[in-house]
Image (cartoon, helix red, strand yellow):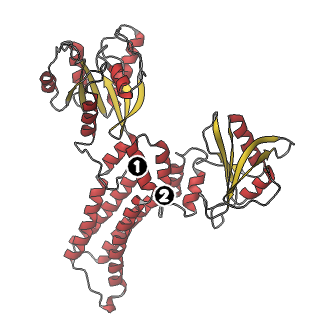
Amino acid sequence: MNSLGWDDTIAAISTPLGIGGIGIVRISGPQARAIAQRLFRPRRGRAALRSHQFYLGEILHPEEDRVLDEVLLVWMGKPKTYTREDVVEIHCHSGILILQEILQAVLKCGARLAEPGEFTKRAFLNGRIDLTQAESVLDLIQAQTARSLELAHQQRSGRLAQEVQRLRESLLDLLAHLEAQIDFPEEEIPELSPAALAQRIGLLRDRLDSWIQTFREGKVYREGIATAIVGRPNVGKSSLLNALLRQDRAIVTPIPGTTRDVLEETVAVGGIPLRLMDTAGLRRAKDSIEAEGIRRTEECLRMADLILWVVDGSQPLGPEDLDILEKIRSKKTVVALNKNDLPARVERDELQGRLPEAPVVSISALRGTGLEELRKTVRALVLKGKVEPSDTVLLTHLRHKQALERCRDALRQALEAAARRFSIEFVALDIRQALQALGEITGETTSAEVLERIFQQFCIGK
């Protein structure tokens, strides 16, 4: 390994395969420029490539006298690149065959195929970004709502790392004071009383507690909520799915049992991604196909974080409705009292009495009435009544939460040691463990195994 990373050069297609306007083959490493000069024939002469400047020309096959494509090529000299290595990007026409031929030409000239996330991994290992910023790259790609995109940008800009650094500096200040007392007793350094020591540690622990509690909200924005739309046949489940999506995704007919399988789509509700699952109507199956659909519906019920129970308000509650009610009684539920454009045969109070914890919203999936109230109700229930996003840096990754919990546990042990009047060497040891846990978040103390697990989630070419 050299001072900036690896001695080899990697390459990959960095745009989705398919027909489009532009495709990009990216190369990073010490041989990037040499490979480009071997394959590229500029439109105007053979002038040496200048860094961060685009050139129009052609990519040639390395062994045959033929042109692979007309391209724009840019060479970017280290360290002012994404990976802090020499980087070349070949911007060609986007077609599967074109991109694969150009990539194969690059590989024949000495590069190797990049592993998933290897460009971003090199950016991290070469010090351009910390681990939280590397993870935010994947979050940006996978963001499903404006709020989840905002949180990813927040992490990419370093807000999370800055919060970690503030905690780290507070711990380092405390540790430095304790170690000075331990190492230089003759200097008459003012000792922290047990009460003062406990107060400083307790304040840091409380900061950690508050931050850890943001994970639930952050996880909702990043991963979304698995939401099962359930009800007996023909109550309007598929109509509600189509209305929330604002498109005809599910087949809607007056024939009960039309939906036989689970349809899954994602829709943004107040910045929260809802992973909607339109399920088969729950009733006694009339054939083996419907029975399989009902089995899958019940599996969705078990997996769902939220239930949208659709009730036909134009018909009295029947045995099938009451069976469903018992199945969802322990789940977080919003009741959609559908078909309010027809004469009511079910009262809101009746449903509220049978399921006191579940809000009831009157809607017409067909007419689109009540849907905005339904969205607000879902959002308030998911976020426990919180309406406006705070300016707090939210935790969105379980890895970060677990590291902060280990940091908090170490501080709890330090508090116990201080309360029992143990030697300050024991308190200092616990604080070092807390610092170790904090370092795992930004990558300062993260193991190679954890790094591999993180970057394997990336696609090849990023």
- Secondary structure type for disc 2: helix
Mark 1: which amino acid? Glu
Amino acid type, residue under disc 2 in the picture: Leu
Q: Which mark is residue 150?
A: 1
**Residues packed near mark 2 inside 10 Å, few (<14), some (14 to 19) or many (20 plus):** many
Q: Residue at coordinates 19% horizontally, 31% vertically from top-left?
A: 359
Query: Does 329 sit above or below residue 117?
Result: above
Quadrant position of residue 295 = top left
Q: Viewer-proximal residue, 119 or 156?
A: 156
Camera-side residue: 423 or 282? 282
Real-space Cα separation, disc 2 to disc 1, in angstroms: 18 Å
Please say if 432 is above or below 62.
below
Dot 1: what SS?
helix
Q: Can residue 2 be seen in the rendering of this structure? A: yes
Left or right: where 313 falls relative to 256: left
Q: Residue 3 sits in which quadrant?
A: bottom right
Q: Is residue 352 above or below residue 199?
A: above
Instruction: Tell me: 135 left or right of 391.
Output: right
Q: Which residue is mark 2?
A: 131
Q: Tags 2 and 1 in contact by the CB under 8 Å rule?
A: no
Horizontal and vertical percent position of residue 272? 35, 40
Would residue 429 be visible to someone looking at this image? no
Coordinates of residue 187 in the picture (x, y in percent): 33, 91
